[in-house]
Amino acid sequence: MLVLKDWTYSIISEVQTQNDYICKWLPKKEDFLQILLDLEAPPLPYICKTCRKDGVYRCPDCMHQPLLCTDCCCSMHAAHPFHRIQQWTGDFFKDSALHMTGLLLHLGHDGAPCPSASANAQATTSKHMQPVGMDEGEWEDIDYIPLHLRPPVGSKYLTVINVTGVHFMLAQACQCVNAESYHMQLFHAKLYPSTFERPSTAFIFLVLDDFLRDNVECGTSGMNYYSKLRQVTSSVFPHLVADQYWELLRVAQQWCLLKLLKWSGFQDNKNGSTKGDLALFCAACPQPGINLSLQANLDHWRYTRTVVMDGNFKAEHMHEHGCYCLCMAWLFLPAFCCGLSKRRKVRSTIASYTHSRMFRQLNMDYSLCNALSYNMNSIQNVICFYDINCTYMKNLQKWVDKTMLLEISPLLRIMAGIGMWHVHRHKKECYARYSPLFIKGSGWVNSEIIEILWSTLNIVSASTHTMTLPHRQELLDFQMNDSNFMKMIWMISSLSWKVKAAWEAVSLARESFERLNQAVPSSQKRRLL
């Protein structure tokens, strides 16, 4: 046992804090800084790494940023056309662009030149290297516009947005007899066109995935993300970079739906497109035929479906102007039905309120009915948690029966509950009747999971205030679907920890009950029972 203590102490003593790492780095600071300064100078002698001619360009995106001549730089980047290069001026390296080296982006034929393309189109490539001239009066208080920010002149160019910034590319489409349309050639090259008739702007698949990832993980809005791309393109002149912000929003909305359809195995909508088909359903909830046998006795409390309801007042929408919806309510937020025009209100019984507070319950009725109609094959028991269930559930069936647009199966047994954080603010009678601790099948839960998830959802919901209603719905759907995915991959470790905590709680509860049972006289027990 003494050896174990010594070994444990040695492990703890070797743990270093962030401050320890910083203290070790400080003596090496000058060495790192010297290397950074040396990297700004060209290698000696000034010769191309490949052909040994005079070196002109270097590529910071390539390993060891080799010095290259114009021809070698163009040929080496045929497979990497979106690297950002720099040109040696004799005194320093300035930003440049690959289209200035004569690089041509070939569509079709796996990136090889099209054999049907005219020789004149390839012979005039050298003319495309000249930047577009600018009128002196066009720019105010700007005497110098970087050449790499000017589109090529003399031919039709393509504006390509990548994670490395905004690029101008000279594109050569396939001109074979059986060639696809130009926008489909771009898509095959992993370039998403912003339009379909004579597209002039395209987005790399990688930048669209990166934007969705930033939006989900960091809550980055489209405006902030494109502002970052402009900084990446030119940190000195970001305001001179081509503005493709609106194109990014439009293409990202389309890309989001395409990714969802791909992940869900859809193709031409042949395998169905009903409500909820694109949503990730909770793997722990009872689903007959999936995680339950079709012959299982679903009347048991173990197969109870749990629903949590609440209203998110921070995710407000400013303008409800219409637009075409892409997802068609295949995810979480159902398309709101205009026929439900009446406002249903209930009176709150929260004790801390000094006045009656009225809530709109129309949306809650519609959401609950849709939730109870999805994937509920033979499920008979439902636990519904809502902050004001003590009054909400009293007239629920009456309001549902008043409209033909809503329906709740009469076979469902709905048990009402109130979350632990809110139930203590209600009357004393509500605690005994609606607390999750006294509802069979609810387990030891606080029932506030939906508000916990809002803390991350509201980070991005601020950027949806002025979106069109369908675009806002699709973005929030994508966020919630990602939240479900993260819960699924962490479910094993989470449930394992909760099972261990539950077993410990069971033993503590049994001991407490035994002490109470021994302390209460028999006569009083008979009155309580």
Image: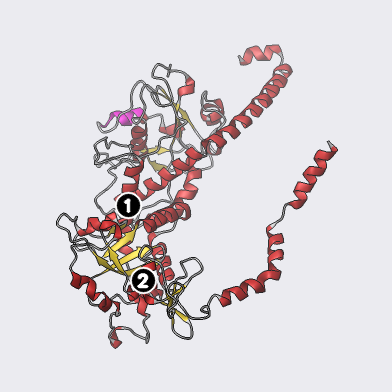
Q: Which secondary structure lies at badge 2?
A: helix
Q: Which is in the foreground here, disc 2 or disc 1?
A: 2
In this picture, residue 196 sits left or right of residue 63 = left
Report the residue at 42% width, 72% height from top.
85
Rendering quarter of residue 98: bottom left
Residue 354 seen = no
Q: Classify the position of the C terminus by image quarter.
A: top right
In this picture, residue 124 sits left or right of residue 521 = left
Front-most of 134 and 340? 134
Q: Amino acid at mark 1?
A: Trp
Q: Position of residue 18 (x, y in %)?
A: 68, 59
Q: Position of residue 205 (x, y in %)?
A: 35, 56
The colour scheme used here is secondary structure
Report the residue at 48% width, 49% height from top.
456
Q: Which residues are magenta?
A: 397-403
**Count of number-bearing discs:** 2
Q: Which residue is mark 2?
A: 74
Residue 222 seen = yes
Q: Amino acid at mark 2?
A: Cys
Q: Residues within 10 Å of mark 2 (few under 14, many from 20)?
A: many
Magenta highlight: main SS: helix
Q: Position of residue 208 (x, y in %)?
A: 37, 56
Rendering quarter of residue 124: bottom left
Q: Classify the position of the N terminus by image quarter.
A: top right
Front-most of 95 and 245? 95
The numbered dot on residue 255 is 1
Q: Position of residue 34 (x, y in %)?
A: 62, 76
Specify the farthest residue to the right: 2
Above or below, 212 relative to 391: below
Report the residue at 29% width, 28% height from top.
401
Q: Earlier in the sequence, mark 2 or mark 1?
A: 2
Rendering quarter of residue 408: top left
